[in-house]
Image (cartoon, grey):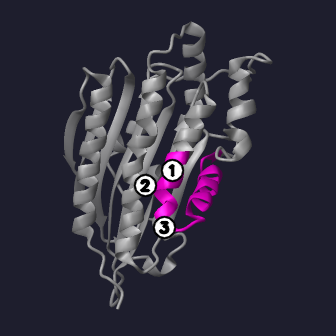
Amino acid sequence: MPQQPDSNAVKQYLLGLQDTICQRLEALEGGAEFVRDAWDRPEGGGGVSRVISDGRIFEKGGVNFSHVMGDTMPASATAHRPHLAGAPWQAMGVSLVIHPNNPYVPTSHANVRFFIATPENGEPVYWFGGGYDLTPYYGFDEDCVHWHETARAACAPFGADTYRRYKYWCDDYFYLRHRDEPRGVGGLFFDDHNTGDFEKDFGLMKSVGNSYIDAYEPIVRRRMDHTYGERERDFQLYRRGRYVEFNLVYDRGTLFGLQSGGRTESILMSLPPLVRWDYSRVPVAGSEEARLTEHFLTGRDWLADDAK
């Protein structure tokens, strides 16, 4: 008999994950702290948004927990599951985006989530999703390798090909088709995950969620005191525009949140505080700015021997 999904266990894990990530980021910051904002959703559920702003290291960061529910699944969640249309549902997850001050520290994003729906006269249907990705402005090979090595280790207990499948899924998902370029250097992405073994599926989500801060923290430490000037800051703000474009045009979490009547302030906390768009901007040939798209934003295999 299939295991019954334990949504309470998932919720307690997610709340603990939010605490851990905030504590470790605050330890890096060494001053500014996350502000806690608990909220209720009139349609059902609520969450806790934790936001840090104007820190020495982090210009803006948000680590959001939400647990929302409703009587009818939103269209974005039933596109591949028409049999669940009209079913009551619950969704919970931790989603975060960190926008550093220093252009040499990359932006990072992570999300782990759990959905469960109960069709009339049917058994509960659940699935997990999640992953994380890295968006540098000035890249470093060793950072990209470390990021992907940590991601591969998190996936290793769940099958020899799991990392590679989720790495390519991430490359495909975080791709700006209207720009014909990746958003960053990738990482992991998975969705609709249900093998029928709830504990194993939950274990995958936990392994990915737990590994995020181990992937990101060493990169921040290496780059947070790197000297930069107006040129680098200007380029960072320009490239942040790509991040905004993806989140508002393609991101499933944004679409689901807005379609399900989610809290707009929490849904859009991922957007950077400052950004710019320039018309037909082209970096100088041979510059570090040109190297970002020529060397880093290529969908390459960072764990191949020639990439280390």
Marks 3 and 1, Cα distance to the nearest angstrom?
Answer: 12 Å
Label 3 to label 2: alpha-carbon separation: 11 Å
What secondary structure prevails in the magenta region?
Answer: helix
Using the rendered view, name the quadrant where residue 140 is placed: top right
Q: Earlier in the sequence, mark 1 or mark 2?
A: 1
Helix, strand or loop at disc 3?
helix
Residue at image position (66%, 38%) is: 308
Relative vertical location of residue 17 with respect to residue 215 in this rendering, above or below: below
Q: In terms of sequence position, does the residue under pointer 3 or pointer 2 come before the other?
A: 3
Name the residue carrying label 1.
151
Which secondary structure, mark 1?
A: helix
**In which quadrant is the N terminus drawn?**
bottom left
Q: Which mark is residue 208?
A: 2
Q: Position of residue 9 (x, y in %)?
A: 23, 66
For residue 306, above or below residue 279: below
Asked if residue 17 is among those painted magenta in the image, a careful observer would answer: no
Q: Amino acid at mark 1?
A: Ala
The residue segment tinted magenta is 149-175
Q: Is residue 158 magenta?
A: yes
User: Is residue 71 shown left or right of residue 223?
Assistant: left
Q: Secondary structure at mark 2?
A: helix
Please name the residue that numbered disc 3 is placed on.
158
Kindly indicate whether the residue at mark 2 contacts the one at mark 1 (C-beta within 8 angstroms).
Answer: yes
Q: In the rendered structure, which disc, 3 or 1, sits on the residue that comes first in sequence?
A: 1
Mark sitting on residue 85 = none
